[in-house]
Image (tube, rainbow, N blue to C red):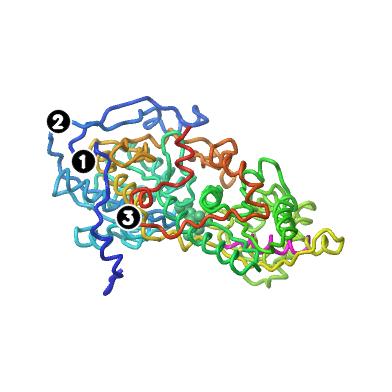
C-alpha cells in the first residue's frame, strides 16, 4: 500500500522497538532437546514422513562464540486469514537475517502460497519493511488460501527458489498452512533440494496450540478489540435498558475467542460450541440457555442483556453437523446445476436429495440460514461459517419460545433484540504490545532456525505469560503435532486443532461464574481499548486464557 498520509499513532508506532527474549539479543547456540513422536497415528505418520519423523525439539542458549553466518536468501509467505502481528513476524525475520549477515536477502511471495507457485514476489528491502513495523494487516505482501499439497506445486516452488538462490522458506500460517509447510519440507528433504521450510503459528482463532505452543499470534489483539466492543455494547445496553444484543464472534471452529471475550467482559450468556457438542445439545437446548437468562432478568425488571455466540456453533450441534455433512456431499456434485437455479429451486433440489432425518431439520431452518448453508464451500470443502448468521437464527428461535411462554403466562417481559458480528474488525488491528513483541520474536527466531540448517520446524517462543526477557526460544518439529484425520474422503496427516477443553481452567472459570452473570444483577466488565502506551500492567497484559492456562 502506497500511503501518502498516516495517522499520528501509526507514525509513532513505526518506531516502537519490539522486545525480544534475552537469549535472542546476542549470539546463540542451538541445542537438541527431547526426541518427538507424532501426536497420534505414529506408524502411519512415520511412513509418510521418513525424513522428518522423530526429530528433537530444539532450544536456544546464549553462546560466547561470535560466528559470522554465511549470507542466505530466504522467502516468506503469509497464508490464510489475517492476524494482527504478521508484519512484525516479517520485520523480525528481516532483522534476524540481517543481524546474522547483512548481505542476506528476504523475498516476499505475493498473495499467499500462490505467489510461490506462480513466481510472484518482491525483495523486501529495509525501506519497505520500515513502513510496516508494528502495523496490522498482511498487506505488505498479501495473503491467500491456496493449498500447497501437490508435487507440481512444490516443483514450481523449487524452481523459483533455485532462480533466486533461496535457501529457506518461512510460512506464516495456521494449522492447515503449517501442515502443508511440513509436507513441503519432507518433499524437499527427500529430493535433496537444499531448501529448508520453517513455520510460524498464526491465527486469531487460538486453535493452533499444544503442549509446546502456548498461543498463536493475533489471538491476543483480536480478542482485546472484540472485548472492547462487547464492553461498549454492554454499557449501551445497561444505559438504554431496552435491547438484548446477540453478538457472534469469529473463530472458524473452536470457541476460544468467545471464551476469552466472556472472561474479559462477563456477558449474561456465552455459548461454547465444544460444550454443546460434548453434551449433544440440540438447538432447542441452546435456546433454553438463553431464554433462561432472558426470563430471569425480565422477572427482575431487566429487559436487556448480552449473548455471545461462537461463529462455528452450527457445526457442533449434532443434528446440524449431520445435515451440513450431507449438504457438503450434495453440493459437491451439484455446482453446475446450481448455477441456473433460483433459491426455492435449490432448496427443493437439496431437500429431495437429503435423508429423511436431515430433510426434517433442513425444513425447520429459516430461509436465510438455508440459503447461507447452501452457499459455495471454501477450498477445503468447508462451509464459510463467517457468512452464516447464527445469531439471527437464535434471535428468531428465542422470540418464538418467549411468545409461547408469554401465552402460557410464564413470561411477562419485553424482548427487543439487535444482532452483531465481530470478526473482520479485529483481524487487522494494530497489534497489541504482546503481539508486536511475540511476532517480532517468532520472526527473529525463525532466522536463527534457518541459520542452524533446520527444516520442518515451527518457530517456538514459550513462557509468554512472563515478561518478554524471560521468554524461551526454540523450535518444534511440525510432524510431532500430526495425527491422521478424514478430509474430503481420504485419511490425511494434519495438525490436530486445539478445541476448548471443558476441564481446562478458562472454561472452568466461565462455568463457575455463569449463573451469576446470567442473573438479574449486571456483572458487566468494560475492558476499554487496547493500550499501547502507559503502565505495563495495562499495556503488556496477556489474555485471561493465557494467565489461567499458565497457572496450572
Ligand atoms: P485462519 O485459520 O487462516 O487464521 O483464518 C481464520 C478466520 O479468520 C476464521 O476465524 C474465519 O472463519 C475465517 O478465517 C474467515 O475466512 P475468510 O478470510 O476467507 O473470510
- Dominant SS of magenta comes to helix
User: Are the residues flagged by discs 2 and 1 in contact, CB closer than 8 Å?
Assistant: no
- Which residue in the protein does label 1 denote? 25
Q: Nearer the viewer, mark 3 or mark 2?
A: 3
Q: How many numbered marks, from 0 up?
A: 3
Q: Is residue 11 left or right of residue 320?
A: left
Label 3: few (<14), some or many (≥20) within 10 Å?
few
| In the image, the residue with mark 1 has its CB under 8 Å from the nearest atom of ligand 1 | no
Q: Secondary structure at mark 3?
A: loop
Mark sitting on residue 492: none
Which one is nearer the viewer's eye here, 9 or 164? 9
Mark 3–mark 2 distance (CA, rounded to whole Å): 36 Å
- Which residue in the protein does label 2 denote? 64
Instruction: Pick whichever of labels 2 and 1 is earlier in the sequence.
Output: 1
Q: Position of residue 278 (x, y in %)?
A: 66, 40
Mark 2–mark 1 distance (CA, rounded to whole Å): 12 Å
Q: Position of residue 140 (x, y in %)?
A: 31, 61
Range of the magenta residues?
Answer: 387-401
**Residue with the most extreme top position:** 34
| Residue at image location 36% in from the left, 60% down from the top | 430
| In the image, the residue with mark 2 has its CB under 8 Å from the nearest atom of ligand 1 | no
- Which residue in the protein does label 3 denote? 534
Which one is nearer the viewer's eye here, 437 or 128? 437
Amino acid at each position: 500500500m502506497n500511503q501518502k498520509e498516516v495517522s499520528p499513532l501509526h507514525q509513532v508506532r513505526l518506531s516502537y522497538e519490539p522486545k525480544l527474549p534475552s537469549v535472542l539479543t546476542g549470539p546463540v547456540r542451538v541445542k537438541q532437546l527431547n526426541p518427538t513422536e507424532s501426536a497420534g497415528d505414529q506408524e502411519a505418520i512415520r511412513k509418510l514422513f521418513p525424513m522428518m519423523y522423530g526429530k528433537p525439539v530444539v532450544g536456544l542458549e546464549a553462546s560466547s562464540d561470535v560466528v559470522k553466518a554465511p549470507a542466505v536468501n530466504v522467502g516468506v509467505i503469509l497464508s490464510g486469514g489475517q492476524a494482527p502481528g504478521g508484519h512484525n513476524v516479517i520485520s523480525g525475520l528481516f532483522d534476524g537475517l540481517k543481524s546474522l549477515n547483512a548481505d542476506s536477502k528476504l523475498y516476499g511471495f505475493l498473495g499467499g502460497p500462490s505467489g510461490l507457485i506462480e513466481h510472484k514476489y518482491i525483495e523486501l528491502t529495509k525501506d519497505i519493511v520500515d513502513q510496516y513495523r508494528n502495523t496490522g494487516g498482511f498487506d505488505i505482501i498479501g495473503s491467500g488460501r491456496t493449498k500447497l499439497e501437490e508435487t507440481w506445486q512444490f516443483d514450481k516452488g523449487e524452481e523459483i527458489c533455485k532462480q533466486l538462490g533461496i535457501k529457506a522458506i518461512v510460512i506464516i500460517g495456521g494449522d492447515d498452512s503449517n501442515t502443508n509447510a511440513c509436507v513441503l519440507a519432507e518433499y524437499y528433504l527427500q529430493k535433496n533440494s537444499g531448501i529448508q521450510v520453517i513455520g510460524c503459528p498464526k491465527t486469531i482463532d487460538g486453535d493452533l496450540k499444544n503442549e509446546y505452543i502456548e498461543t498463536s499470534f493475533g489471538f491476543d489483539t483480536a480478542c482485546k478489540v472484540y472485548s472492547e466492543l462487547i464492553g461498549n455494547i454492554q454499557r449501551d445496553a445497561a444505559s438504554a435498558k431496552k435491547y438484548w444484543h446477540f453478538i457472534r464472534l469469529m473463530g472458524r471452529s473452536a470457541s476460544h475467542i468467545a471464551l476469552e471475550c466472556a472472561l474479559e467482559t462477563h456477558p449474561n450468556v456465552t455459548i461454547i460450541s465444544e460444550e454443546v457438542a460434548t453434551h449433544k445439545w440440540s438447538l432447542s437446548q441452546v435456546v433454553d440457555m438463553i431464554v433462561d437468562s432472558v426470563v430471569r432478568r425480565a422477572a427482575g425488571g431487566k429487559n436487556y442483556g448480552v449473548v455471545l455466540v461462537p461463529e462455528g456453533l452450527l457445526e457442533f450441534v449434532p443434528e446440524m453437523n449431520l445435515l451440513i455433512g450431507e449438504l457438503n456431499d450434495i453440493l459437491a456434485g451439484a455446482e453446475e446445476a446450481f448455477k441456473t437455479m433460483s433459491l426455492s429451486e435449490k432448496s427443493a433440489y437439496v431437500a429431495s436429495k437429503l435423508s429423511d432425518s436431515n430433510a426434517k431439520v433442513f425444513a425447520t431452518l429459516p430461509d436465510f440460514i438455508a440459503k447461507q448453508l447452501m452457499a459455495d464451500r471454501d477450498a477445503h470443502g468447508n462451509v464459510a461459517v463467517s457468512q452464516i448468521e447464527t445469531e439471527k437464527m437464535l434471535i428468531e428461535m428465542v422470540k418464538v419460545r418467549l411468545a409461547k411462554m408469554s401465552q402460557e403466562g410464564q413470561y411477562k417481559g419485553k424482548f427487543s433484540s439487535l444482532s452483531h458480528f465481530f470478526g473482520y474488525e479485529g483481524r487487522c488491528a494494530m497489534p497489541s504490545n504482546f503481539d508486536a513483541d511475540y511476532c517480532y520474536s517468532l520472526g527473529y527466531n525463525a532466522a536463527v532456525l534457518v541459520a542452524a540448517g533446520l527444516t520442518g520446524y515451527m518457530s517456538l517462543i514459550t513462557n509468554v505469560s512472563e515478561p518478554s526477557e524471560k521468554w524461551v526460544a526454540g523450535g518444534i518439529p511440525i510432524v510431532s503435532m500430526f495425527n491422521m484425520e478424514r478430509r474430503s474422503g481420504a485419511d490425511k496427516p494434519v495438525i490436530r486443532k486445539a478445541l476448548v477443553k471443558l476441564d481446562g481452567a478458562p472454561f472452568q472459570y466461565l462455568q463457575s461464574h455463569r449463573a451469576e452473570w446470567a442473573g438479574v444483577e449486571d456483572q458487566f466488565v468494560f475492558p476499554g481499548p487496547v493500550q499501547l502506551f502507559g503502565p505495563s500492567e495495562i499495556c503488556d497484559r496477556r489474555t485471561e486464557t493465557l494467565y489461567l492456562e499458565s497457572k496450572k
